[in-house]
Image: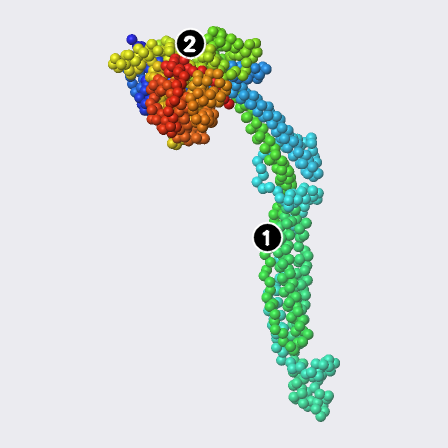
Amino acid sequence: MTDAGTVKVRTFAPMESFRGIGGDLFTRTGCWLGKKTVIFGRNGTGKTTFAEVLRTIDGTDENSGRSAVLASYAEGNRWRTGPLPESVVRRIHVFNRYFVEEELAFFLDGRAASAGILKLGARNVHAEKALRSVQDSLVRDNRWLETVRATRGTLARDEKAAKEDAKRRVLEVLGTVREQTYNSRVFTVATVKKLLLESQPEVALDEVRYGQHMDLLRRQDAPRRVPAIAAPPLDLLDLGSRVGEAVSRKLSSVVRSALENDRVLSEWIQAGLDLHQAGDLCRFCESGRLSEELRTAYSSHFDTSSAQLRDDLESLARQIGEAQGALQSWWEELPEADDLLPAYQVRWKDVLATLDAVRRSSADHLDTVAAVVSQRAENLYEEVAPRDAAAPDAADLSEAGEVLAANNADVERMSEVRQQAESEILHHLVDSFRKRYLTAVRRQELATRVQSSLERQIRSLRQEERRWQDDQQEVGQMADLINQDLADHLGHVHLTLTVSEDGQGYRVLRGEKLAVNLSEGERSSIALLYFLRSLEADDVTPATDLVVIDDPVTSLDKDGLFAAFSLVTERTKSFAQMIVLTHDFDLFRLLLVNCEKARAASVRAIRSGDTKEKEFPQVQFLETKAHMTASGDREISLHPMSPRLLEHPTEYHYIFHRIAEAVSTQVDADLPLLGNAARRLLEGFVAFKAPSGGDFRSKVERAASMGEVPNELTQRMIRFVHGASHRDEPNPSVTLGSAMVSEELGQVLRFVYSCDHDHFTGMCKAVDVDLKPQVARWKKAAGLQRSKPVPKPPAAQSPNPLPFDQPEN
């Protein structure tokens, strides 16, 4: 009675295509797994991928990135179809090259002489990798910590230098004006630090204001108030109009040219007018008498209007001169900029510039009216058109008043003003060092936080280091078991495992020397032995579990191969289900012979109608194949192994079958791989036909001569097998296209047929392949008739393969 927890997997398929394996891996060819399944396939046909699907199943976490698999499976006697549950997944144990990579790893122990330390087991390998990562992080973080500490020292020196430079600058400047306050004894670095940490002043000093403050602080005498200034003497509003009236006034006097040109006579006649009456006898008379007409003319000449005009012009000229003098006196009496405090001198210079403009405008006005008055005074009897004599606007003294008021207010509180100027100078001097100082302080704070963080992280990493060291499994007993298996089963008596000094790994010795560079075969052997020993762990229950082993004999010699076969067979015989995958035909044949009785019993039971045996046979023999799709992707397929091949289990039969099948069916799935198979087929054939020949070519040519094969066919076939052999992976970009490869493979079979008809016919019958159509074409093409007997071929059913030479390079 089967236990309810027994695992049985009949078919499976990844939910998404996995390295060329799709959902129709089993269903497309109508095959399935059995209690013991042997799967044969050449390199590159997907055996490792097949095993990896089962190794990376995750039945619980869809977001883990591991394979999700749909399967036909059973726990006990009830078959189900769906995702493999965790209860089944945890009972699947897989060995393949990925297992070797994960479960076996070398590390360099940097604390010793760089000797190799071998870790076995995914847990130990993972723990060791994590431990190395932690230790690398510790080295890195300690290096960073040293850098941060050095940086903190540099920043501390920068901070100190900024304070000392700020102090030195303050003493250089303010020490010249306030020596008692600004000296090294009173003005300390602590004071500078306080100033540097204060908020930045609202108004930064520019060069002008800085100079004003320094001038104020250097000033020894006590400043005095500056009196208010009077308005400029510009009461000239009526002067302009009076000048205009005077210079344009019309006179009632009539000037006589004779009197105008004779000043003495003019004065005499003017004085005598009052002494003479018309009719009097005098010089002015005509014919000795003064006529009325002449007297009127003389009186008109000496009319008082001209005298009045002269007086008015002289008065105006005098007033204009007085105004000009008053204006100049007013200007000269204005305060100079130096009379004010330095802070107001610039503004006062602007005020003086404004008042000077008023002064010059007023002076220009007075000069203009003076020139007009002078022009009329020179010729009283010629009227002058008045010029623009409008007086300038009155001066605005509000700005001057504000400046003087502010200046005088500061004079009244001079002690406070000096103190403010000193404070602004002090902050200005210190401020030039503030950015440098605060940058050093902030970076120190950041470095301090980083240092604290690193120290915490280092403490945490040391705890994690101890945790990973403690997590590694004890290795002493495993070393003894593997050494025993190496010696007893695989014949690696030259290899031994010793526990490393820390007790958490192995040192591998080859003889008495450290063996760091293990060969692929040695690594695989150790990993296989560890895997098989891990099947003895407490959490493994053979009666209910599934074991998958992929290529357990990689790189082993014939003796090692048989030992590995025996060991695998013995250690896995009690497991509920077993799957072995191999590319080695010798191992395949050993497995086939070992299972022959069980296979025969299974075949009989199925033929007798046993449905349970049919759906889950005791033994199954399958084959993997791979080909390239039209899109260039690799596609893996699984097929039942030919019953005829199972009856004739030699590699020679298998190779003949694969080549004959490809030629007869024109299937190009494995054509790129079959060039190598064709060479191996010929090597076996000619080794029998020409056992005493020399190298490969010589044997082929000797066999050809014995069978009367045309030299053209012989050389063509040799060129093909030399050029197409040693291809381990399907590759659509080979030199020959698929159709040509198929044709050339046909020529290889034609060569065998031409050399030995009976052997060829027997092989076709043995592997159940019909090549009669091809034979007919060969006969037709060559026009050959068999003319003489040929040596008896080897029995097609021989259980032993023909000997193989090594391929010619």
Decide: marks 1, 2 in contact (CB < 8 A)? no
Residue at (71% x, 92% y) in the render:
287
Side (left or right) of 59 relative to 221 = left
Q: Classify mark 1: residues with Cα within 10 Å, few (<14), some (14-19) or many (20+).
A: some
Residue 58: horizontal and vertical position, in percent? Answer: 38, 20
> Mark 2 belongs to which amino acid?
Ser
Residue at (46% x, 21% y) in the render:
702
Vertical arrangement, residue 182 with respect to residue 588, above or below: below
Q: Classify mark 2: residues with Cα within 10 Å, few (<14), some (14-19) or many (20+).
A: some
Distance from disc 1 to disc 2, alpha carbons, whole Å, reads 117 Å
Q: Quadrant of residue 413?
A: top right
**The N terminus - image quarter:** top left
Q: Which residue is mark 1?
A: 399
Q: Which residue is mark 2?
A: 566
Q: Is residue 370 visible?
A: yes
> Mark 1 belongs to which amino acid?
Glu
Q: Nearer the viewer, residue 291 or 519?
A: 519
Side (left or right) of 552 relative to 26 = right
Residue at (66% x, 89% y) in the render:
292
Residue at (61% x, 73% y) in the render:
385
Residue 544: horizontal and vertical position, in percent? Answer: 35, 11
Which mark's residue is nearer the viewer, 1 or 2? 2
